[in-house]
Image (spheres, helix red, strand yellow):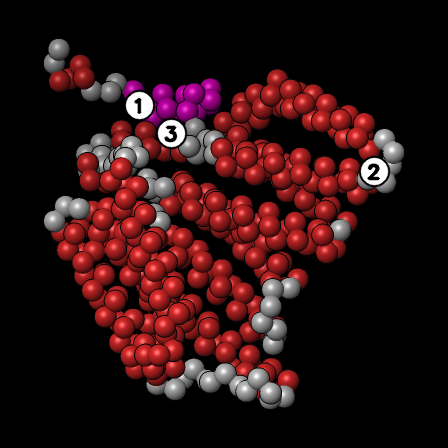
């Protein structure tokens, strides 16, 4: 067989026809057209292709060692930090970052990429401590007011801290973004997500001139919105990258939405509850489009959780509560069967024209 016989013999007109017939998605059609017009330029190098490695003892040991190191460093800080003084604290932070991060870079250069990435992950997690210790050492970070001082002094202290926390969180996010850009190591996305969440809270508190250090309704609303934003970023990353960056955004995003919307429901009851069922039904629909089981898991569990919550609130004092609960269970089974038999195939057929992302 000649090389010419091995070449693809279709044109853009064929691609348009396949798209009209639903055989390919719009995104797939775009990639095919690019391959037809410039086959050499659109071929990914072997190093850029996603290779899924099986979970083995080495991988588990690397992850366990990395998280254990970060936990141990945090424990060390909490238990012994005050005894080193401000200069000592800063020097320990910097030396730890340089030593651990340098060892990570060395391992990467010798071919032990996963081990090196885990050490860089640990070094990235220490950066906020170094920034905080530097601010205290040079006198930028104000001292904690006396416990016997006035409430006005406490409020002034909290307002003074807001811009400092924002600056520290920006530094942490920037360093984590640089680390993930260098390593292409998805777990570093967790560091980005965590400090971005803290940044969203403190920016909101800064503009609201809030002096409260707790976690109230304002923080719950901001975190729920932030969780939705994480899910949107996850969808974007799923479309644009070959690495599993989106998984961290999906997991943390769903937890942020579920926990905080649930807390708001318990506080405000009906008002937030009006958006709970439509929101999680939308997640069920999205799970078909994205082909992401995590959307299906959170969508189904949360949807049924709220149904049970409404049943409990309405019929708990009834003598027939157990019978009503059993009836609800039967209705859940029947509605699930209806969804599986009719709704899911319909969604899969109609959403396919927008392009499944998995």
* Residue 12 located within the stretch drawn in magenta: yes
Q: Are marks 3 and 2 in contact (CB under 8 Å)?
A: no
Q: Are marks 1 and 2 in contact (CB under 8 Å)?
A: no
Q: Which residues are magenta?
A: 10-24
Q: Which residue is mark 2?
A: 315
Numbered circle sitting on residue 11: 1
**Nearer-N-terminus badge (1/3):** 1
**Along the horizontal axis of the image, is 129 left or right of 306?**
left
**Nearer-N-terminus badge (1/2):** 1
- Disc 1 and disc 3: Cα gap in Å? 11 Å
Q: Relative to the observer, which residue lies in front, 91 or 138?
A: 91
- Residue furthest out toward the top: 1
Numbered circle sitting on residue 29: 3
Q: Residue at x 52, y 69 (%)?
A: 202
User: What is the quadrant of the C terminus in the image?
Assistant: top left
Q: Is residue 42 visible?
A: no
- Disc 3 and disc 2: Cα gap in Å? 53 Å
**Along the horizontal axis of the image, is 266 left or right of 19?**
right
């Amino acid at each position: 067989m000649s090389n010419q016989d091995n070449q693809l013999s279709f044109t853009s007109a064929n691609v348009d026809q396949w798209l009209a017939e639903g055989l390919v998605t719009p995104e797939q059609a775009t990639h095919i057209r690019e391959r037809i017009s410039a086959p050499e330029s659109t071929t990914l190098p072997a190093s850029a292709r996603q290779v899924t490695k099986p979970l083995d003892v080495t991988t588990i040991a690397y992850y366990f060692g990395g998280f254990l190191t970060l936990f141990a460093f945090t424990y060390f800080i909490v238990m012994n930090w005050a005894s080193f003084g401000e200069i000592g604290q800063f020097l320990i932070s910097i030396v730890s970052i340089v030593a651990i991060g340098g060892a990570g870079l060395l391992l990467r250069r010798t071919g032990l990429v996963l081990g090196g990435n885990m050490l860089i992950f640990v070094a990235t997690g220490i950066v906020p401590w170094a920034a905080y210790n530097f601010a205290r050492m040079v006198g930028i970070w104000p001292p904690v007011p006396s416990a016997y001082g006035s409430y006005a002094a406490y409020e002034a202290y909290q307002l003074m801290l807001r811009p400092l926390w924002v600056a520290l969180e920006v530094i942490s996010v920037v360093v984590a973004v640089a680390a993930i850009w260098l390593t292409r190591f998805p777990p570093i996305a967790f560091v980005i997500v965590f400090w971005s969440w803290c940044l969203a809270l403190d920016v909101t508190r800064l503009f609201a001139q809030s002096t409260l250090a707790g976690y109230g309704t304002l923080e719950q609303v901001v975190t729920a919105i932030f969780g939705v934003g994480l899910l949107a970023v996850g969808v974007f990353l799923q479309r644009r990258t070959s690495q599993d960056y989106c998984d961290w955004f999906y997991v943390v995003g769903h937890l942020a939405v579920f926990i905080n919307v649930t807390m708001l429901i318990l506080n405000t009851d009906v008002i937030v509850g009006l958006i709970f069922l439509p929101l999680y039904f939308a997640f069920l629909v999205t799970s078909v489009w994205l082909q992401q089981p995590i959307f299906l898991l959170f969508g189904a569990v949360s949807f049924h959780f709220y149904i049970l919550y409404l049943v409990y609130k309405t019929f708990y004092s009834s003598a027939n509560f157990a019978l009503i609960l059993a009836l609800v269970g039967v209705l859940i089974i029947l509605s699930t069967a209806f969804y599986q038999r009719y709704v899911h195939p319909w969604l899969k057929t109609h959403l396919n024209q927008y392009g499944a992302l998995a």
